[in-house]
Amino acid sequence: MQASLTATSFFAPASFDGPAQRQEPAQQGEMPAGAVDSNELLKGQKAVTIVHNGSLYRLQATKLGKLILTK
C-alpha cells in the first residue's frame, strides 16, 4: 500500500478541530498571530532543549540559518 501526499496537504497546517486549512503568508515584517521569533527561543544560543508531552527535543540553528528539531 502506498500513501500519497499532495502539496496542499503537505504545506497546509493541520488542525486538531478539523481538516487542514490553507493560511496566507504574512507580509514582510509582519508575524502571524501566535508566532514566536526563533531569537526569542534560542536567546543567543546555538541550541535549546524543548520538553513536549514528556519527551525531550533539541532545536538547533545551523550555520546556514536553518533550524533542526530532533528527538
Image (cartoon, rainbow, N blue to C red):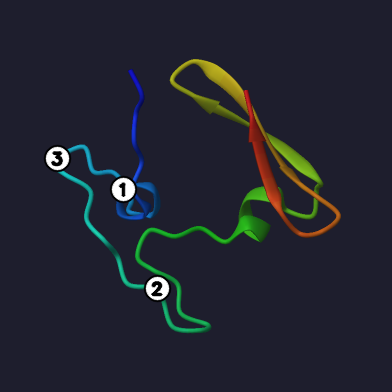
Label 3 CA crowd tier, 10 Å (few <14, some 14–19, many 20+)? few
Residue 37 sits in which quadrant?
bottom right
Q: Which residue is mark 2?
A: 25
The residue shown at (39%, 73%) is 25
Q: Residue furthest left?
A: 18
Numbered label attached to residue 47: none
Q: CA distance from mark 3 to mark 2?
A: 21 Å
Q: Earlier in the sequence, mark 2 or mark 1?
A: 1
Q: Residue 33: horizontal and vertical position, in percent?
A: 35, 65
Secondary structure of residue under mark 2: loop
Q: Residue 71: horizontal and vertical position, in percent?
A: 62, 23
Secondary structure of residue under mark 1: helix
Residue type at the position of mark 3: Asp
Numbered label attached to residue 17: 3
Residue type at the position of mark 1: Ser
Q: Which residue is mark 1?
A: 9
